[in-house]
């Protein structure tokens, strides 16, 4: 016979003595029984996992928006500085040195 989800069942758990003492101390501090403290902490782990997932999704979304903004800004800066998509400088920004051509520096202007 299967049990109903709302039915309370007894579970035996093995744990280290030092962990049991920590739980007992926390239960006394919070005014709870050891059982109630254990259940409260177990419930919190499920809530935290979902909260962390939601926060991670929000952070990734913000990061994607930031990266897209940086890409658009970089493209706009290239256009204003006279650099084409391939990163080459147009002829007006180059200086000829013998048989070599290199980008002109600001002090060369």
Image: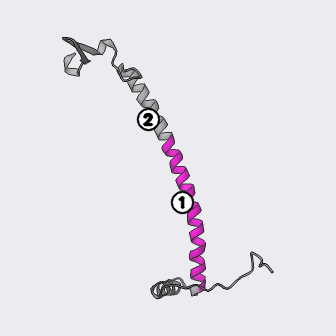
The residue that appears at 57% across and 81% down in the rendered structure is: 38
Quadrant where the N terminus is found in the figure:
bottom right
Numbered disc 1: secondary structure: helix
Quadrant housing residue 70 = top left
What's the CA distance linking mark 1 and mark 2? Answer: 27 Å
Give the mark nearer the N terminus: 1 vs 2. Answer: 1
Image coordinates of residue 8 in percent, x first then y, are 71, 82
Image coordinates of residue 35 in percent, x first then y, are 60, 85
Give the crowd class for mark 1: few <14, some 14-19, many >=20 residues within 10 Å: few
- The overriding secondary structure of the stretch rendered in magenta is helix
Quadrant where the C terminus is found in the figure:
top left
Left or right, residue 32 beside residue 104: right
Question: Closest to the observer: 57 or 11?
Answer: 11
Q: Which residue is mark 2?
A: 70
Residue 13 magenta-highlighted: no
Quadrant housing residue 82 = top left
Residue 58's place in the image compared with 39, above or below, is above
**Start-end of magenta stretch:** 35-64
Numbered disc 2: secondary structure: helix
Image coordinates of residue 65 in percent, x first then y, are 51, 40
The residue that appears at 38% across and 21% down in the rendered structure is: 80
Residue 45 magenta-highlighted: yes
Question: Closest to the observer: 31 or 40?
Answer: 40
Q: Which mark is residue 52?
A: 1
Residue 14's place in the image compared with 61, above or below, is below
Left or right, residue 16 beside residue 82: right
């Amino acid at each position: 016979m299967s049990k109903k989800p709302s039915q309370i069942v007894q579970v035996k758990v093995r744990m280290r003595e030092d962990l049991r003492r920590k739980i007992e101390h926390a239960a006394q501090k919070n005014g709870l029984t050891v059982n109630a403290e254990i259940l409260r902490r177990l419930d919190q782990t499920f809530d935290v996992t979902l909260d962390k997932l939601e926060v991670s999704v929000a952070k990734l979304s913000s990061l994607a928006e930031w990266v897209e903004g940086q890409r658009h800004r970089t493209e706009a800066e290239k256009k204003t500085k006279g650099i084409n998509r391939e990163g080459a400088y147009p002829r007006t920004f180059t200086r000829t040195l013998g048989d070599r051509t290199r980008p002109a520096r600001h002090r060369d202007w």
